[in-house]
Image (spheres, rainbow, N blue to C red):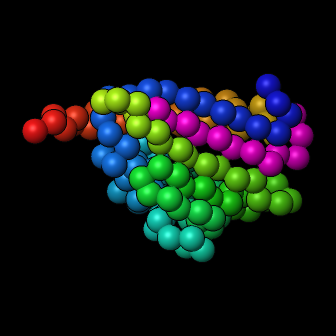
Amino acid sequence: MDDRRIELQAEVDGQREDLFALVSSADGMARWLDGAQISPKPGSPVRLQLRDAVAIGTVLAVDAPQHLSIAWDWEGEPLGCPSVVAFDLIDHGARTHLTLRHIGFPGRASTELHAALWRYWFERLVAAARALPVATPA
């Protein structure tokens, strides 16, 4: 594992247009996080509830329905400089390849802590994606 990078990937049934809301809207993120406040517009504030912890930040970039990235820090326990979380969705036939990247950690211990955190939450994201109805081509 890179000292300053986490990357998780999964492939799920469905088109990225149908899955993008799971990583870019408050309602979509609330399906796999404990709560979310986000608007998919660069510069918009972000607040994500993960059990007893709250991540705060700002939307950095949006290229719907393919990419969303946010500056990330912990409310009350900042890392010193925000790290960046990015979600990418790539069409792969009738499926979507979903990637989560988190970069910019101050060192190995922080990376390992966030890697454990993201393994849990990414599994929930993938489960939420798999629970969505899959549109059938007309």
The x and y percentages for residue 120 are: 56, 31
Please tell me which residue is depicted at 49% across the width and 27% down the height of the picture.
10
The x and y percentages for residue 11 are: 44, 27
The x and y percentages for residue 79 are: 82, 55
Q: Can residue 52 be seen at all in this image of the molecule?
A: yes
Q: Quadrant of residue 115?
A: top right
Please tell me which residue is depicted at 86% across the width and 59% down the height of the picture.
80
Image position of 104 with respect to 96: above or below: below
Q: Relative to 112, is 14 on the left or the right?
A: left
Image position of 123 with respect to 65: above or below: above
> Is residue 122 or residue 93 the one in the foreground?
93
Q: Quadrant of residue 42?
A: bottom right
Please tell me which residue is depicted at 70% across the width and 53% down the height of the picture.
84
The outermost residue toward the left is 138
> Is residue 135 or residue 100 the one in the foreground?
135
Q: Does residue 106 show up magenta in the picture?
A: yes
Q: Does residue 64 show up magenta in the picture?
A: no
> Is residue 121 or residue 53 the one in the foreground?
121
The C terminus appears in which quarter of the rendering?
top left
Please tell me which residue is depicted at 74% across the width and 62% down the height of the picture.
76
The x and y percentages for residue 39 are: 46, 68
The outermost residue toward the right is 107
The N terminus appears in which quarter of the rendering?
top right
> What span is in magenta?
97-108
Q: Can residue 77 be seen at all in this image of the molecule?
A: no
Instruction: Give the mark count.
Output: 0
